[in-house]
Image (spheres, rainbow, N blue to C red):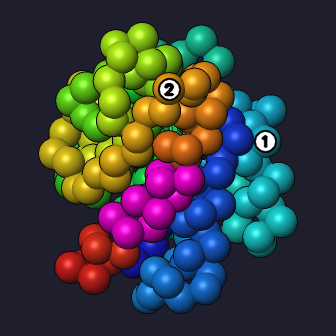
Amino acid sequence: MKLGILISGRGSNMVALVDAVESGEISNSEVVVVISDRSDAAGLAKAEERAVETLVIERMGRKRAEHDGEIAVELKARGVELVCLAGFMRRLSPDFVAAFPRRILNIHPSLLPAFKGVDAQRQALEAGVETTGCTVHYVDEHLDNGDVILQREVPVLPNDTVETLSNRILHEEHIAYVDAVRKIVVSG
Ligand code: GRF
């Protein structure tokens, strides 16, 4: 299965996926392109180090549908069959979602439907929950919505800061995303 990964920043989930494809942990797959909407995304260099093609497609004041339409054209041109959002900080237009039916995944640092949107780890700390985690889900045109594929739980510890909690969740995100993509590749 040909994968395309969209990023906006650090790219650690993208690296987890690329490395799992490379090691064969996710078999019969290839990451054919990593696309960032930001030219300063640190993940771009990490993809290049791994010899994955990278593209920067910035919004540049355009309407959402025009911007993600250009991204969809590049994905389709490379035969991408599964789109993985990995810290991609933009919502997708209905046309983009329709172009890849049930073939767009996202990872979010909470147990959805709890704590949608930005700063999910801070939201969990402020809510005083004892358990949070991460979710891999199908993407629709609504924010952090769509059917859940899998979740991993993480305890919230008494002295946690946003940083310590985020790091604990991130460790589970990398496992969850690889598991979810493997599951989809296996089921075709
Ligand atoms: C992760 O916490 C992910 O759940 C959220 O954005 C962050 C991206 O981190 N959607 P990275 O760029 O994959 O390191």
Please report the residue visible at 43 percent of the width from the left and 88 percent of the height from the top: 28
- Front-lying residue, 125 or 111: 125
Picture quadrant where residue 22 is located: bottom right
In the displayed structure, would residue 120 be above or below residue 84? above
Please, what is the dominant secondary structure of the magenta stretch? helix
- Report if residue 116 is visible in the image: no
Mark 2–mark 1 Cα distance, whole angstroms, equals 32 Å
Please report the residue visible at 63 percent of the width from the left and 73 percent of the height from the top: 19
**Image coordinates for residue 164, horizontal then vertical, percent:** 62, 33
Q: Kindly identify which residue carries mark 1.
A: 42
Decide whether residue 180 is among the magenta residues.
Answer: yes
- Residues tagged 2 and 1 counted as in contact (Cβ below 8 A): no
**Image coordinates for residue 78, horizontal then vertical, percent:** 51, 66
- Front-lying residue, 84 or 130: 130
The residue type indicated by label 1 comes to Ala
Please report the residue visible at 47 percent of the width from the left and 52 percent of the height from the top: 173
